[in-house]
Image (cartoon, rainbow, N blue to C red):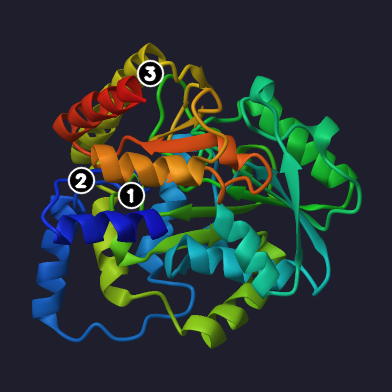
Amino acid sequence: MDVMQAAERAEAAGRHIIHMEVGQPGTPAPAGARAAVARAIESGALGYTTALGLPALRARIARHYSDRHGVEIDSGRIIVTAGSSAAFLLAFTALFDAGEKVGLGLPGYPSYRHILKGLSLEPVGIETRAEDRYQPVPELLPEGLAGLIVASPANPSGTMLDVGALSALIRWAEANGTAFISDEIYHGIDYGFRPVSALEISDDAWVVNSFSKYWSMTGWRLGWLVVPEAQVRQVERLAQNFFICAPHVSQVAALAAMDCDEELQRNVATYAANRELLLRRLPEMGISRIAPPDGAFYIYADVSGFTSDSRAMSADILERAGVAVTPGLDFDPGRGARFLRFSYAAGAADLAEGMDRLEAYLRKG
């Protein structure tokens, strides 16, 4: 967010900035979703829904698991939330007591740590390895974890867990009495093999998803949480008191968006082409220590050959090249000073110009 604000200040001063820092699609919500909202606004008030969400949307999400993952999920287990952030807040509050330890891979999404700390929980960072493609593996997991959060595809690396690797983590959690939370918000954006949902392996996993990424609806703030049947009522009570409900208008949009796959697949095709561009151009510039992403729209690159301070380097790239990239420190406080995250969610023309600018910057030194 700091990088984004600095980029916006530069733009306000008249500069043209290439945005490779932003973790969101550059495309709007699907046309069908926008049309559905227009109709709903004209038809009457969009008041509170139930805390669990519109029944039609919950049923459509359940069908999504059947269609995409071959898993039959009772729609009663699905809680529609005000973005995935609300889903994490509900899951952490329902599952854990103050002071308990929750494991998460490093590098990883920084808000996990901050939400846990805000709830008086103890985040336990697990330093993942390049040879494991920056994903946790059972032999690295410490004892005494009340919970474990795993993301596939991951942010910032974009790497995924196949069914064997995900199963091994879930079985470890079951054997150690550890709650398993699966962050699946980048499902749908994948290159080469289909993402596996934790629900294909275990009914006890807590699964978080979002309309922000594949469905291109970041600002609509809508996600969902799938919980074991026995915990639905507990989470419902929490949701009622924390949020009343997720935004009604966003739920209308999301229901329509789920039938807009043709448009959304065009977005994924753009990400795939952008990915290929970066995987070709970055090594040509000397940035070759990369775990090629399986999904999402990020490349997490070791830039220790150029700097030991990625924060300073990202600021310098923005100042001298007009390209906004994200330092790795938020994702990994211990090792992130030698990493940068490149987002390739922007348009193809911008990405190509960004690569030209970055190459010129590195050539000048």
Query: Which residue has dot 3 on it?
Result: 279
What amino acid does circle 1 point to?
Answer: Gln
**Element class at badge 3:** helix
Q: x%, y% of residue 60?
A: 38, 55
Of all residues, the one furthest to the front in this rendering is 364
- Badge 3 density bin: few <14, some 14–19, many ≥20, Cα 10 Å: some
Q: CA distance from mark 2 to mark 1?
A: 16 Å
Q: Determine whether 28 is above or below 158 in the image.
A: below
Q: Quadrant of residue 223?
A: bottom left
Mark 3 and mark 2 lie on one chain; the one further toward the N terminus is 2
Query: Which residue has dot 1 on it?
Result: 24
Q: Residue at x 29, y 45 (%)?
A: 319
Query: Which residue has dot 2 on it?
Result: 17
Mark 1 and mark 3 lie on one chain; the one further toward the N terminus is 1
Frontmost of labels 3 and 2 is 2
- 295 or 110: which is nearer to us? 110
What amino acid does circle 3 point to?
Answer: Leu
Frontmost of labels 2 and 1 is 2
